[in-house]
Image (cartoon, grey):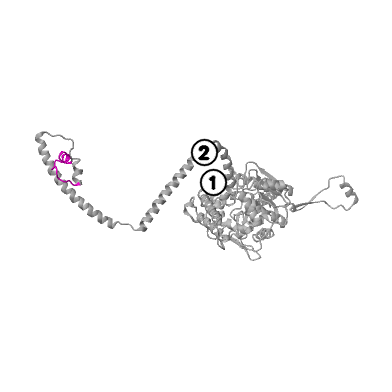
Amino acid sequence: MGGEMLSAYGGGEVGATMTWEDEMMSLVDDAWFRYPDDMGEAAAAASSEERDAMDRSDRTSASEFHETSKEEVVVLSETLRDQVGGFLRATGELVAELSRGCWDIMLQSLAAAQHTFVGKKMKGKCVSASRKLGFLNAFLPEDRDPTQAWPVVICVFSLSLMVNTFPKPDGYEVGGKLLWLQLAVLIVSSGNAFRSQPQKKLYVSPPSASRIQLPDGRYIAYHEQGVAVKDARFSVMVPHSFLSSRFAGIPGISTSLLEEYGVRLITYDLPGFGESDPHPGRNLTSSALDMHQVANALGVVDKFWVVGLSSGGLHAWAALRYIPDQIAGAAMFAPIVNPYDSSMNKAERRRTWENWTSKRRLMFILARRFPSLLPYFYRRSFLSGRLGQPEKWLSLSLGEKDKSLLEEPKLSEFWVKNVAESVRQGESKPFVEEAVLQVSNWGFTLADLQVQKQPERKCFLPWLRSLYQKPELKRTGFLGPIHIWQGMDDNVVPPSMIVFIKRMVPGATIHKLPNEGHFSYFWFCDVCHRQIFSTLFGVSKGPLGNVSKAENSEGYNEELTSDTNAEKERLEEVTLD
């Protein structure tokens, strides 16, 4: 049977043995082409010759293939280390693909779960919890993506809890926990995979400030705007706020407006800020004394006005308390008061604290109770050497008007320059001192600024009259004007503070600003600046130099007119004679 098959398919002898190559070739001999009889024999002969040649070439190539394969097997043999490495790489790729697949499945499940009954019920609670815990993102480094950093922290923390359940060797109780905590911080702080976007560095320009030396030997850097000292009709001193410098002053004030009202604007760096030397025992008394000495050194002979914005109002309050005889008046814009002031009632304190962000409340608590922890947060924000946003660095909750203002290019440029000068020295101590001053005992209350005293009744008749009439009260302390502007949409210094200020300082004039925030009225607003100057100084009269020139001109004209009239009278007398 096998012989018949071989003769039928292969055309060879019945008893001949065939190699496996011949058997494979025999399967394709019959290509289902049929030729005429006269062509069939020729084709069969040709195909037989071609098949013999192909068989010889196949045998040769097969033998060469076997020899080459043996050599390659010898050459390409892998070591155990390479095999293990390849296995681990393949395992890692499989795990990565599995993780991506699980992540996609989880996202799809969450997206679908939002439309379910349970998802709709839990969505509001999850959003509320996320909003309440959002302040924790402020404790991450500036360039980390919270969605990637927090899972790492949570995983490391979970591992630390798991490890703590097992028996621990001696000395692990403290060291082991710190090790896991350091591991979490190290992964989040140094891992490039968690960087959200590269941040620009803060450029600090070379020193260029004008400085004066105070009697105690310290140097204070200052900056002047407006008219010269001899032409100044009004002198204005501006102590800057937290994370600011002498460049702040009145942000965006025009030189033409200062000259129109004859204003000499003086700003200076607080001790330890910018290019000013630090003060070894800084407090509010020394702050008022510094202001007085700077004014004297710069030739301010008469009384001067003091302007305070936000936390800069702290130093304006100190000037009104300790050097009231040197102050002509005060202009404050959303001035801060001590949130721990004992004169606050419960309602005022509650309305003040509830308007602040969680981190801002935490910063106040740390400044009050644990000020030594503040440098940790400062070095990870504005002392890190990188650019950042004011609302994040200062833990502020800004309104829409303030946010749109901060996005303007001119204000961004001003902000970068001002902050860079503020952190020039790179020390956290002056910022800690400033934060502590805000929440510590000031040494006075706002009620001490304008004290109302009842006049003494030495006679019987005035005493009897006081029983039936309302007694006349006399104000002592600072008796000059105090103007306070407050934005009603301000979330940094809540409007509730103004209620407290008005109760403590009844002589202050409050200007409520509807739809204004913390910065929107005072920063880069020409119309607002003109309104402020008009309120403080009345009608503009220009510098004193222009007045003297005008007076000299009028005197010369009067003298010329009198000489002309005298000459006319003399001529008339000559004519009559």
Q: Nearer the viewer, residue 32 or 427?
A: 32
Q: Amino acid at mark 1?
A: Glu
Residue 214, position as x, y percentages in the image: 64, 63
Which residue lies most toward the left here?
Answer: 38
Q: Secondary structure under badge 1? A: loop
Q: Which mark is residue 408?
A: 1
Instruction: Assess disc 2: are there few (<14), some (14-19) or many (≥20) residues with their C-alpha within 10 Å of its C-alpha.
Output: some
The image quarter containing residue 4 is top left
Residue 204, position as x, y percentages in the image: 53, 58
Which residue lies most toward the bottom here?
Answer: 217
Mark 2 / mark 1, whichever is N-terminal? 2
| Residue 4 covered by magenta stretch | yes
| Residue 307 covered by magenta stretch | no
| Label pair 2/1, CB-CB below 8 angstroms | no
Q: Secondary structure under badge 2? A: helix
Residue 548 seen: no
The image quarter containing residue 181 is bottom right
> Can you tell which of label 2 and label 1 is closer to the viewer?
2
Residue 7 seen: yes
Instruction: Assess disc 1: are there few (<14), some (14-19) or many (≥20) residues with their C-alpha within 10 Å of its C-alpha.
Output: few
The residue lying at 22 percent from left, 54 percent from top is 67
Q: Nearer the viewer, residue 290 or 351?
A: 351
Mark 2, residue position: 113
Which stretch did the figure color magenta? 2-19
Residue 149, position as x, y percentages in the image: 51, 51
The N terminus sits in image quarter: top left
Q: Amino acid at mark 2?
A: Ala
Q: Which mark is residue 261?
A: none
Residue 515, position as x, y percentages in the image: 63, 41
